[in-house]
Image (tube, grey):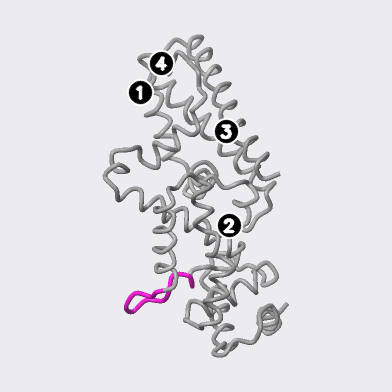
Amino acid sequence: MDLDQFVSTAMAAWPPWPGADPVAFARFVGGLRASAEESDPLTSLRAADLWLAFHAGFGVAPAVAALEAACFADLANVLRARRAPPAEAEEAVQRLRHRLLVAEPGQRARILTYAGRGELRAWVRVAAVRAWLNLKRETPLANTGPSVEDALVTEATSDLELELLKGKYRDLFRRVFLETVEALAPGTRLLLKLHYLDRLSMEEVGKVLGVHRLTVLRRLERARHELSEGTKERLEVELRLAPPEVESLLRLIQSRLDVSLQHALAESRSAAG
């Protein structure tokens, strides 16, 4: 597929919109590909979603209305399903709408950062969850609560029923685990946060990242392994136990950590099923 065919495919997905600009859209898509670290084939990009995001970003009224119907109409319900109070859910959606569609002076609308690699609806949904989390951080109650990183630690270790975590090693384990999380590659941290904090299913994460859900599963398994091994290595250094004691202790942690993350994956798989 060449660029002309891509533009034709995008146009055909929507009714003719007054103010639509195929030439400018073609330049936009060309710019996306030029700025990407890896040039995706046009067939891997979502032509219809890019057409919608591009024209909504430039204020074409029918495109803005179509975006509202396709991506914003159920966002408050999505947030409420993730335990956002109704007032917070509505406020987060309003903030996101302004953030994505209203350009700052000298800037383009942020919806134009959508690159077409995953479903636009899923991309907006993740942005809505982020907007809600940011809103929570602004309130005094949220500011006294755990950080995003602490929440990730709690999520990943919530069922670690170990004496190790109940006594003098509890704070040590949390600190070491957090250090291990922070040492992960940015892409791996994003994957974990999308799945464990934003509570997206593997299928939803796949749509955001533009990969198959089985690829998400494999990446989550690798991330779990990295967390487990990194935590073990740091604990071995911190505790300075004799080798047999280290092996026994770390095998126990390995076993329980695996169970914790496998439960989370199984729950997500059931929800997505």
For the record, the magenta segment spans 102-112
Please name the residue shown 61% across and 52% down the image. Answer: 204
Other-residue count near label 4 (Cα within 10 Å), few / some / many at <14 / 14–19 / ≥20: few
Please give the count of numbered marks on the rendered protein.
Answer: 4
Foreground mark, 3 or 4, reads 4
Disc assigned to residue 166: 4
Q: Where is residue 236 in the image (x, y as percent from the top left)?
A: 44, 20
Dot 1: element: helix
Say which amino acid is labelled 2.
Val
Callout 3–callout 4 Cβ contact below 8 Å: no
Foreground mark, 4 or 1, reads 4
116 shown above or below 175? below
Q: Position of residue 54 (x, y in %)?
A: 53, 77
Say which amino acid is labelled 3.
His
Specify the quadrant that holds the C terminus: top right
Q: Earlier in the sequence, mark 2 or mark 1?
A: 1
Please name the residue shown 56% across and 28% down the image. Answer: 260
Q: Is the magenta stretch mostly helix, strand or loop?
A: loop
Q: Position of residue 139 (x, y in %)?
A: 29, 48
Disc assigned to residue 171: 1
Label 3 – label 1 distance at C-alpha: 22 Å
115 shown above or below 143? below
Dot 3: element: helix
Disc assigned to residue 208: 2
Label 4 – label 1 distance at C-alpha: 9 Å
| Residue designated by label 3 | 225
Dot 2: element: helix
Label 3 – label 4 distance at C-alpha: 24 Å
Label 2 – label 3 distance at C-alpha: 23 Å
